[in-house]
Image (tube, grey):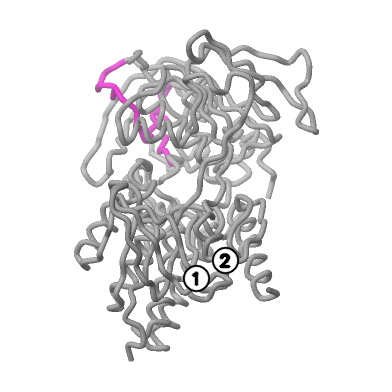
């Protein structure tokens, strides 16, 4: 049955990569999980809020506890986790070039490759954006929730998507004041329950508003914001000055696609999921049939969807490597798709569902 | 479904938007007894309110993006759903004589103490009136979301949603 003894290599030990590795190992397939960071878990350990979803998606559990559960499971299964290990190259025929601890370089042949490399936060440039005190929302979240350092006392949050409103809330929990959340679009982006929670704490939301500049001698001391018209141009005379010492940017994420480009995966452009990303089929296989893409690299969504995508790929790769029979693969795949579909409904999910359907359609045409 | 204009521009739902969905209790229903009030008017994939309820008094069903529906005949106002809701969208309110009470979730430090005078706030974060802390519970099962009960003048019962944060510079 075992037609392939080369391990499956999973790159990225966030929620998607961990779940892919867990499914592979549970099926008995050899698997190596690599991550450039000193600790696994990706962004899960800075998620201190309770997750949405249903019981089977671990709803109501705080993100870092989900991370702990996944880590415990991967340790119990004895997955070969290689930390501080950067994957810097991929040769077709599936040779993975890794650099461990910035000192030791080696290559490893992969039976299958699962890329769970995540996404990178977008920046926004404006006069003063290089002043100390301007940072991405994810950076502020890492500072407060991982390192326990408050980046500032008065915060302006730029962007009202879930990242912006969740981090605004967590900055207040950490002891800061949030002066405002601004949004370029005419309507707020994040879940209403998140915005409501932030609003009742006295934080104003300004729609159709952008940041004009940051001011300060050595670091941020003020932010100038203004209303914008339908063409996103600032309206003269609407400027407001906010006394803030920190400006957080929560203006979207872009899939980290570099390794998928090296693996010659066909790339497509899906703006509503973050821009360029590798095309994939319903098993999360890229155009390179030995390479899977899961989590934010395959379209920016959430940790809960990333975990299910990771499972889909892990299940399919285990089957393709001969470690799972057809029927088990089908049953597990259907269960996972059911959970994934449940997360892609409603007014927020529909847009992502439609975009994911488009990806699948493009894959078929390719 | 309405487009929730207030929710999507001010960040908070208006009373009209909430009433349209029907998850709030009327003042008559609250007379002398606690009533579950949910402020979850947007279809998001989430149902811990349903699974946390031992009485089956909250139904989300399938798909899990349905809005929760309360069966008041089954609800015992035990309050288990308050910390279970990841959106902190559930409170329990009651009125008696000229007083009202609200039980609500709380995740900010410092915690108030029982007997403290506090300022009640509305959904826009505006201070409404004085209130007094009646109880604070935070058992293990709440997973770090405390549940606070505050008492305040009856006339603010529909607008009050929480208390002002007692912020001290760190």
Q: Gap in Å between the C-alphas at discs 2 and 1?
A: 8 Å
Residue A189 - label:
none
Helix, strand or loop at label 2? It is loop
Q: Quadrant for residue A214, please give it.
A: top right
Q: Residue B71 at what x, y percent from top left?
A: 46, 54
Query: In this figure, what is the number of numbered marks?
Result: 2
Residue drawn at (36%, 63%), measured in percent from left and top?
A: A19
- Residue carrying label 2: A264
Q: Is residue A40 magenta?
A: no
Which residue matches tag 1?
A92
Crowding at dot 1, Cα within 10 Å, few <14 / some 14-19 / many 20+, comes out as: few
Tell me the residue at 31%/23% (across/down): B133
Residue A66, percent from left and from top? 32, 53
Q: Which residues are magenta?
A: B90-116
Which image quadrant: the C terminus of chain A?
bottom right
Can the viewer see residue A89 in this picture?
yes
Query: Is the Cβ of the residue at disc 2 closer than 8 Å to that at disc 1?
Result: yes
Q: Is residue B155 at all visible to an observer of this figure?
A: no
Residue B7 sits above or below residue A127 on the image: below
| Residue beneath the point at 47% across and 52% down | A118
Q: Position of residue A315 (x, y in %)?
A: 40, 75
Residue found at x 61% / y 31%: A124
* Same-chain status of marks 2 and 1: yes
Instruction: Judge by depth and name the residue closer to the eye, B81 or A207.
Output: A207
Residue extending farthest to the bottom is A1
Quadrant housing the N terminus of chain A:
bottom left
Q: Earlier in the sequence, mark 2 or mark 1?
A: 1
**Mark 1 falls on what kind of element?**
loop
Residue A31 location in percent, x, y?
31, 70
């Amino acid at each position: 049955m075992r037609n392939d003894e080369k391990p499956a290599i999973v790159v990225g030990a966030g929620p998607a990569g961990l779940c892919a590795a867990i499914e592979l190992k549970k099926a008995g397939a050899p698997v190596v999980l690599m991550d450039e960071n000193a600790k696994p878990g990706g962004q899960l350990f800075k998620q201190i809020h309770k997750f949405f979803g249903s019981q089977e998606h671990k709803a109501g559990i705080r993100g870092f506890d989900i991370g702990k559960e996944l880590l415990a499971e991967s340790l119990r299964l004895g997955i070969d986790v290689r930390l501080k290990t950067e994957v810097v190259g991929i040769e077709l025929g599936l040779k993975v070039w890794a650099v461990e601890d910035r000192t030791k370089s080696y290559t490893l042949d992969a039976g299958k490759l699962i890329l769970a490399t995540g996404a990178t936060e977008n920046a926004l440039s404006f006069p003063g954006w290089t002043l100390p005190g301007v940072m991405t929302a994810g950076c502020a979240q890492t500072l407060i929730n991982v390192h326990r350092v408050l980046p500032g006392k008065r915060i302006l949050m730029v962007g009202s998507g879930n990242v912006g409103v969740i981090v605004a809330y967590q900055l207040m929990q950490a002891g800061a004041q949030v002066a405002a959340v601004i949004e370029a679009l005419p309507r707020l982006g994040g879940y209403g329950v998140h915005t409501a929670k932030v609003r009742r704490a006295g934080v104003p939301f300004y729609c159709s508003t952008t940041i004009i500049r940051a001011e300060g001698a050595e670091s941020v001391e003020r932010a100038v914001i203004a209303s914008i018209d339908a063409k996103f141009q600032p309206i003269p005379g609407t400027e407001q000055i906010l006394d803030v010492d920190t400006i957080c940017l929560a203006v979207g994420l872009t899939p980290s696609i570099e390794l998928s480009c090296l693996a010659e995966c066909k790339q497509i452009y899906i703006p509503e999921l973050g821009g360029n990303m590798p095309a994939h089929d319903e098993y999360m296989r890229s155009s390179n049939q030995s390479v899977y893409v899961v989590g934010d690299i395959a379209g920016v969504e959430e940790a809960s969807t990333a975990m299910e995508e990771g499972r889909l790929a892990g299940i399919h790769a285990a089957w393709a490597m001969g470690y799972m029979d057809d029927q088990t693969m089908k049953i597990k795949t259907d269960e996972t798709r059911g959970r994934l579909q449940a997360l892609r409904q409603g007014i927020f999910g529909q847009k992502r569902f439609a975009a994911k359907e488009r990806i699948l359609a493009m894959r078929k045409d390719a | 479904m309405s487009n929730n204009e207030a929710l999507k521009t001010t960040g908070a739902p208006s009373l009209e938007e909430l009433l349209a969905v029907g998850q709030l209790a009327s003042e008559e229903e609250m007379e002398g007894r606690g009533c579950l009030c949910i402020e979850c008017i947007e279809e998001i994939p989430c149902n811990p309110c349903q699974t946390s309820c031992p009485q089956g008094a909250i139904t989300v069903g399938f798909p899990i993006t349905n809005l929760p529906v309360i069966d008041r005949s089954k609800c015992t106002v035990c309050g288990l759903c308050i910390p279970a809701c990841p959106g902190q969208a559930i409170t329990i309110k009651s009125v008696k004589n000229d007083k009202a009470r609200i039980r609500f979730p709380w995740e900010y430090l410092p915690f108030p103490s029982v007997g403290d005078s506090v300022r009640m706030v509305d959904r826009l974060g505006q201070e409404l009136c004085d209130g007094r802390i009646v109880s604070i519970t935070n058992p293990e099962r709440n997973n770090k979301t405390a549940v606070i009960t505050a008492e305040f003048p009856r006339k603010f019962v529909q607008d009050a949603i929480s208390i002002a944060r007692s912020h001290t510079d760190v």
